[in-house]
Image (cartoon, rainbow, N blue to C red):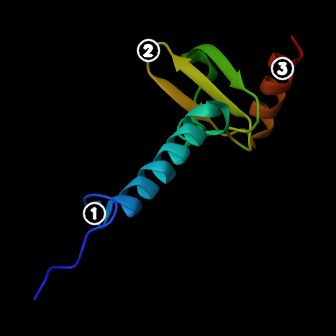
Amino acid sequence: MSLPAMSGGPRPWPGLGLLLLGLLILTAMVASSVANPEESNDDLNCVCVKTTSSVHLKRITSLEVIKAGRHCAVPQLIATLKNGRKICLDPQTPLHKKIMKKLLES
């Protein structure tokens, strides 16, 4: 018996084609996710998860309004209290709506 003749040199590793295809797909996926960081949803979410409507205005030292946008569908009103703690105020409360309107107009 004779061994079959090998034509063209040594035979490549059988899974090499699949490995190269997988690497090509992985590279394309990484490139597409890095190319447009603005469209990434990693850091795009509401700051205020929990809100309160019961805070005395004398306890507030400063207010910050974050407009509704791609990051969050509702406007956010963040109050800094005299003790340094930050809380989110309910934007649907009538008084808070007036405050936000005044701050957004200025």
Residue identifier under label 3:
104
Q: Does residue 99 show up? A: yes
Quarter of the image with the C terminus is top right
Q: Residue at x 67, y 29 (%)?
A: 77
Using residue 29 as the reference point, say whether residue 23 is left or right of it. left
Using residue 39 as the reference point, say whether residue 11 is left or right of it. left
Q: Amino acid at mark 1?
A: Arg
Does residue 70 sit above or below 21 in this rendering? above
Measuring from the top left, give residue 76's x and y in whole percent: 68, 33
Q: Amino acid at mark 3?
A: Leu
> Regarding mark 2 in the picture, which secondary structure is present there?
loop
Disc 2 versus disc 1: nearer the observer:
1
Q: Earlier in the sequence, mark 3 or mark 2?
A: 2
- Marks 3/2: CA distance? 23 Å
Residue identifier under label 1:
11
Measuring from the top left, give residue 81's x and y in whole percent: 51, 18
Residue identifier under label 2:
84
Q: Earlier in the sequence, mark 3 or mark 1?
A: 1
Q: Residue at x 65, y 33 (%)?
A: 36
